[in-house]
Amino acid sequence: MTRAAHDKCGICAIIARLAQGKSPDLIAELPNSWVVLGDAQFYRGYCVLLAKRHVPEPFLMPRAEALNLFGEVCSVAEAIAEVTHPLKLNYECLGNVEPHVHWHIFPRHDDDEQKRSPVWERPAKERMRTLDEHDRGALMAALRAEISKRIPNAHLPGD
């Protein structure tokens, strides 16, 4: 990756803010990724996992690193499921807008009338729901607790 590509990457910019402790959305720093609470809390518990390495495709990582990253995806998903009790989790690793490996993990529930459709079909104004500060804090604390059970070397804010 060239320095110019890194400098233009929106996800690399987010990671720089996370590393400086400048994001209220940070849930955890993991060995190969950062986990943040997503902005689309219509799907309560939606998180984004950002690979630390700037690559557009997982196969461009050293194989062991890519496999460890996917293990983190699975552990974070399991933590989200434990906290939110979804009908199903949806996973997306697109990179069409930001060519930096990252995973969207959306809990889907039975009361969602569009539960069989991709989350992106719901209008953005509906998806981009925020949580009140109490609920947001409780959700993030529960996610941190469950992630740290699965990934003991997770670094949590305030550690």
Image (cartoon, rainbow, N blue to C red):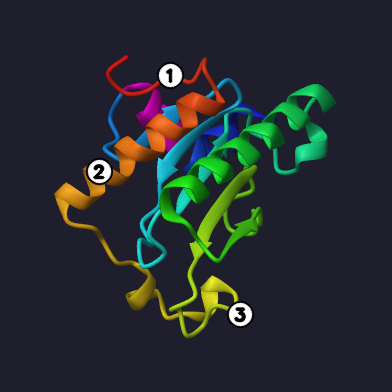
Q: Percent x, y for residue 15?
A: 45, 32
* Of the image marks 2 and 3, the number of the one nearer the N terminus: 3
* Image quadrant where one finds the N terminus: top right
Q: Which residue lies under the disc numbered 2?
A: 138
Mark drawn on residue 88 = none
Residue 66 occupies which quadrant of the picture?
A: top right
Q: Does residue 12 lie above or below 43 as drawn? A: above
Q: CA distance from mark 2 to mark 1?
A: 18 Å
Mark 3 secondary-structure assignment = loop
* Of the image marks 2 and 1, the number of the one nearer the N terminus: 2
Residue type at numbered disc 1:
His
Q: Does residue 124 lie above or below 58 as drawn? A: below
Residue at 25 percent across and 43 percent down: it is: 138
Which of label 2 and label 1 is nearer to you? 2
Is 109 covered by the magenta stretch? Answer: no
Instruction: Tell whether label 1 touches label 2 (CB within 8 Å).
Output: no
Q: Which residues are magenta?
A: 14-20
Residue at 21 percent across and 51 percent down: it is: 135
Foreground of the two, 151 or 110: 110
Foreground of the two, 16 or 64: 64
Q: Which residue lies under the disc numbered 3?
A: 116
Residue 50 seen by the camera? yes
Residues packed near mark 3 inside 10 Å, few (<14), some (14 to 19) or many (20 plus): few
Q: Main secondary structure of the magenta part?
A: helix
Residues packed near mark 1 inside 10 Å, few (<14), some (14 to 19) or many (20 plus): some
* Image quadrant where one finds the C terminus: top left
